[in-house]
Amino acid sequence: MITKSLIKIMPSFIRKKVKYNQDLRKIIGNINWLTLENILRNLIGLFLVAWVARYLGPEQFGLMNYALAFVALFSALATLGLDNITIRNIVSDPEKKGEYLGSTLLLKFFGSLMMLIISAIGIFLIEPSNTLVQLFVVIIALGYVFKSFDTIDLWFQSQVQSKYSVFSRSIAFLIISILKVGLVITQAPLIAFVLMYALDSLLAALLLVYLYHKKATFSFFEWEIKYDVMKNLLNDSWPLILSGIAIMVYMKIDQVMIGNMIGDAQLGIYSAAVKLSEAWYFIPMIISGSVFPAILNARKKSNELYLKRMQMLYDSFTWFTITVAMITTFMAPFIIRIIYGVEYIEAATVLSIHIWAGTFVFLGVASSKYLVAENLTKISFHRTLIGAITNVILNIILIPKYGIFGAAIATLISYGVSTFCILIPAKSRVAGFSLLRSFNLAKIIKKALKWLKQNENL
C-alpha cells in the first residue's frame, strides 16, 4: 500500500499520475515492499557484517569472502539467465504460465547442480592442499541448489506481487541473523558462519513454497515441464548465461585474485569496503524489475513513450548515484572507523574509489532491461565479456603495484567500459546515447530545482 506521506514527498506531476493510475500505484507499491526488504537486510546486515568482521578479524573474514567470491564466479549457472526471460514470457503469454514456470524450475535445478560440481572441481584444482576452503566452497555452492525455488518469485514479480517473496526472504533472513548473533556471542568457529549461507537459502525456499501454496491463483500441479519450452528458454537465455558468468567474473574476480596474490588479510580489508560499496546495488534491481512490465506495455503502445520512460530511468539513476558517491567519498574514513574499527582503516581509500562504480552498475542494470525488451541479449554478453576481460587485465597490472587500491581502480574502470560498450553495436546505440544524455548535469540540476520549487511548502 502506498502511504499518504510517500505520495506527499513526490513531485506534483508524479502525484497526479499516481493518484489516478492504478497500475502505477501497484508498481510503486511493489517497489515499496522490495525496498523495505532490502533496507531491513542492509541495516541489520551492515550491523552483522561489521560485528562478524570485527570478531573474525581481517584474515578469517577474508578467507570466508574468498570462498564466497569463488562460488559467485559460477553462480550464473544456477539461474541460467532465465529470470527476465521467464517474466517477459508470462507477461506476454499468460496462458502458458504453467509451462514457463515448470520448465524454468527444472532448468534452474539442473543448473545449480552443475554449478555445485564445477565449483567443487575448480577449488580442488586451484587449492589442492587447502581442505578448509574446499569445504567452505562446497557448503556455499550447496545453498544455490535451494535457490532454484526462486522460480516462484518470478511468478510473483510478473504479477507485481513481490510482497510475498519479501515475506519469505525477510523471515529467513531474520532467523539467520539471530543465529549469527548467537554464533558471535558463543564464539563459534568460522565454519559455523559459512553454514549460515546454505541454511538461509533453504529457509527462504521453504517459505516461498508455503506462501505460493497459500496465495497463488493456480497450484503447483498446473506447472508443466515441456521440452520445447525448455529449448526455447535456453535459446533466448544462453547469451544471458554467458553474460551472467562475465558479470560475476568482473564483480568477484578481484577478490579471488587478491586472495591468491596478496593474502586473506588484505582480502578481508578489501571485502569490508566492497560490502559497503555494493550495499545499495539492490536499488536498480528493484526499480528496474518493478517498472519492467510497464516498460514492456509502453513499447506496445508507442516507441516514443517507451524510449521516454527509459530516459527517465537513466536520468534518475545518474543523478542519484553521483550524489551518493560524492558524499561517501568525503565521509569514507569516518564510516570505516565507526563500522569496522581502526583494524580496517585501509578500507576507507578502497571505499572512496569503489563507490563511484555504482553509477555504472545502476545504468548497466537499467540498460539491460532495454536489451531484454529488444531481444538483444547477445549484446548483454558482449558488453559484460569486454568488462570482465578489462577487469582481469587491469587487476593483473594494478594489484602487484598498488594492492587493494589497484583492485578498486580496476573495478571502477572495467564497470564503465562494460556499461558504455552498448554504444558499439548499431542496434543498441540509441540506448547508449540515452545513457550519455543522462550525464547532462545542467538538465539534472534544472529538474532538481524545479522539484524543490514545487515542494517548497512540504
Image (cartoon, grey):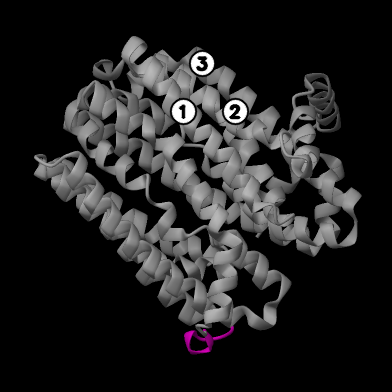
Q: Which residues are magenta?
A: 217-223
Query: Is disc 2 surrounded by few (<14), some (14 to 19) or many (20+) residues within 10 Å?
Result: some
Instruction: Work out how far the residue at label 2 is from the one at label 1, CA to CA, in angstroms.
Output: 9 Å
Q: Which mark is residue 329?
A: 3
Vertical comparison of 348 with 26: above or below:
above
Vertical comparison of 446 with 232: above or below:
above
- Looking at the image, which residue is at 77% across and 20% down? 441
Instruction: Tell me the residue that label 1 is attached to.
Output: 391
Q: Earlier in the sequence, mark 2 or mark 3?
A: 3
Type of amino acid at the residue the image marks with label 1: Asn
Instruction: Work out how far the residue at label 3 is from the one at label 1, CA to CA, in angstroms.
Output: 22 Å
Vertical comparison of 53 with 67: above or below:
above
Give residue 164's position: percent from left, percent from top.
Answer: 51, 67
**Cβ atoms under marks 2 and 3 closer than 8 Å:** no
Taking the image as shown, residue 406 lies to the left or right of residue 48, namely right
- Looking at the image, which residue is at 23% across and 39% down? 64
Vertical comparison of 343 with 231: above or below:
above
Give residue 362's position: percent from left, percent from top.
Answer: 61, 37
Relative to the observer, which residue lies in front, 179 or 345?
345
Q: Which mark is residue 417?
A: 2
Relative to the observer, which residue lies in front, 155 or 423?
423
Q: Under tag 2, what secondary structure?
A: helix
